[in-house]
Amino acid sequence: MEQVVQQIVNGLALGFIYALIALGYSLVYGIIRLINFAHGDIIMVGAYVALFSYLILGVGFVPALLIAMVTCSLLGVTIERVAYKPLREAPRIAALITAIGVSFLLEYGFQLFFGPQQRAFPEFFKTHHYKLGILSVTNEQILILSIAVVLMLLLNFIVMKTKTGMAMRAVSFDKDAARLMGINVDNTISATFALGTALAAAAGMLLGLYYQQIDPLMGFTPGLKAFISAVIGGIGSIPGAMIGGLVLGITEVLVVSLGYSTLKDGVAFLLLILVLLIRPRGIFGEKVVEKV
């Protein structure tokens, strides 16, 4: 039992990282009904920006995190304005294909300029272990959990308590009605992309801290798993993205602890299939009634 509890604690760190990424998927889907498959590669961009901020500017963990988040926010807004905005009224398949194209552009663009090899992620501080009763946690795990919780609370405050968040919810509910009420829909969508990509950048830095290495393809698998997390929780739902990420992270760590590390990716997809069979709209997803 002690080992099970310990593995659940270990899985919380990974689960919160998945949740941060999944929030970006849910935000964008909730606004414009787009599955932004380039979102996973923003994770990689954030990790690289943090790495070069440390190597070139010599900054510490928090400044590197802020630089990565701001840089990826600008990148996310640029991608939305250049690649997605012209296709807003086009069939969804066109935007989906474009998102896949942007994903490949980021992956192989970074391979071209920085090489395909893995890079060691900097150790911003020495690892320390702390005993909490029967549990053992590291300062890195505490940092990951703390940053993830703070960012989630901040996102919830922005969405629920600010004018930008009110505009986001209005556009999500009815874009045309929101425009008639004087809401700038284009700026609201850009703000949504900025928030989602900032969270992805933070997750990329935390992933680098978690695995201690990064590469140009590092965002593909975590991005896919975060998408699974968003679907499990109910895509478009912010609480659902959080819960889905935690469920997937804990499940993955438990599978690895049982000695089935080669099956951890397969278990993620198996969990997705089971949720879709039992509750297709996800844990927190709302039932949609289609009028004929």
Image (cartoon, rainbow, N blue to C red):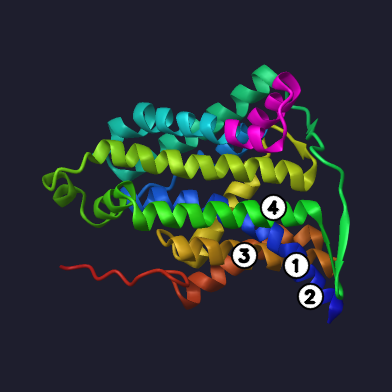
Q: Quadrant of residue 200?
A: top right
Q: Which residue is mark 3?
A: 246
Q: Is residue 5 above or below residue 11?
A: below
Q: State if disc 2 and disc 1 touch (CB < 8 Å).
A: yes
Q: Secondary structure at mark 2?
A: helix
Q: Quadrant of the C terminus?
A: bottom left
Q: What is the C-alpha distance between the residues marked 4 and 1?
A: 12 Å
Instruction: Give whichever of discs 2 and 3 has the lower sequence position.
Output: 2
Could you tell which of marks 3 and 4 lies nearer the N-terminus? Answer: 4
Is mark 4 in CB contact (under 8 Å) with mark 1? no
Q: Which residue is mark 2?
A: 5
| Pointer 1 residue | 9
Q: Amino acid at mark 3?
A: Leu
| Main SS of residues in magenta | helix
- The quadrant holding residue 192 is top left
Q: How many neighbours does mark 1 have within 10 angstroms: few (below 14), some (14-19), or many (20 or more)?
A: some
Tell me whether circle 3 and circle 1 mark residues in contact (CB < 8 Å). Answer: no
* Residue 37 visible in the current orientation: no
How far across and how far down the image is residue 57, in percent?
70, 20
Amino acid type for the residue under numbered disc 1: Val
Q: Quadrant of the N terminus?
A: bottom right
Image disc number at residue 256: none
Q: CA distance from mark 2 to mark 4?
A: 18 Å
- Residue under label 4: 144
Position above or below: 274 against 61: below
Taking depth in this image into account, of 192 and 292 the one nearest to the observer is 192
Labels 2 & 3 near each other (Cβ < 8 A):
no
Left or right of 29 on screen, residue 254: right
Cα distance in 3D space between marks 2 and 3: 14 Å
| Mark 4 element type | helix
Name the outermost residue toward the left. 180
Amino acid at circle 4: Ile
